[in-house]
Image: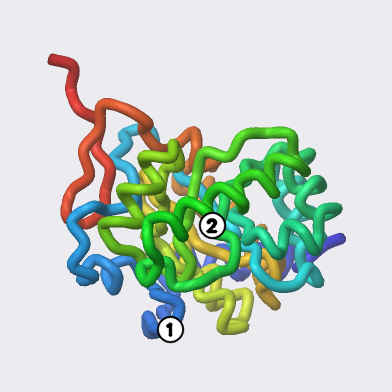
Amino acid sequence: MRFVTVRLRSVLTALLLGGALLLGSGLAYATDAAQVWNSGARSLPVYSVEREDNKIAISFDCAWGTEHTDAILSALASAGVRATFFTVQFWAEEHPDYLKKVSDAGHEVGTHSATHSYMSRLSEAEIRAELTSSSQAIASVTGKNVALFRPPYGDYDDLLIDTSRDMGLMPVQWDVDSLDWKDLSAADIASRVISRVQAGSIILCHNNGLHTAEALPVIFDALRAKGFEFVPIGELIYYENYTIDVAGRQHPQADK
């Protein structure tokens, strides 16, 4: 399936690489990462990664629906891009066929909680229950262990971050929000993403965004033309010997 014609894709890519005008950042789903850094938490998830090799990651949150997921998977396959999907437990249980399809295509799967609640309001026991049951639900379908966690709504506190790390789940946010959940046009989605990406960026999209699949070929073409390489988040982040600065950017620690 072609999401845009070759002619349209080339026109859009030229416009975006030339610096098309951006939409306002918006707010609702904890949009751009800067909005979340004011949470007051001292323990921070990974928003982006300090890298010198121009690697970046694109991620998709899965909580409701599957109507546009096949188109997204087709766009990823056509571009040879491996992504990271964060799935809520109830989505995984309602759509095990899609979860298996995502995993079998070579994409990474992390947990997005069990119930998609505001987890900063939960006790440690409740957090552990959410992360344990959701990880087990994913692993039972994919046959693979879960290593990544994205808090719903971008909402977290020290307890949530510390607990997830103690459970062996790396908490991950994003520094580039596509705002595709707002049903922006494909051109607007692509413009937001392309203009904001830097080496080590983590892009936030959704598996059921109305125009996400249509925007992906433009995003992939434009960012690759800038020298970026897409990898799953698990291949972008550091699991040991790192620090996280106040902006949520992960830095490797030099060997002593």
- Does 248 sit left or right of 66 as displayed? left
Quarter of the figure with residue 165: top left
Residue 204 point in image, percent of width and height: 50, 62
For disc 2, the marked residue is 130
Q: Determine the CA span between mark 1 and mark 2.
A: 23 Å
- Does 14 sit left or right of 245 as displayed? right
Residue 230 point in image, percent of width and height: 54, 42
Examine the rendering and report whether any part of residue 181 can be seen. yes
Residue ID at (39%, 83%): 27
Residue 115 point in image, percent of width and height: 59, 67
> Which residue type carries mark 1?
Ala
- Does 195 sit left or right of 79 as displayed? left
Quarter of the figure with residue 124: bottom left
For disc 1, the marked residue is 28
The colour mode here is rainbow
Q: Residue furthest left?
A: 256
Examine the rendering and report whether any part of residue 55 can be seen. no
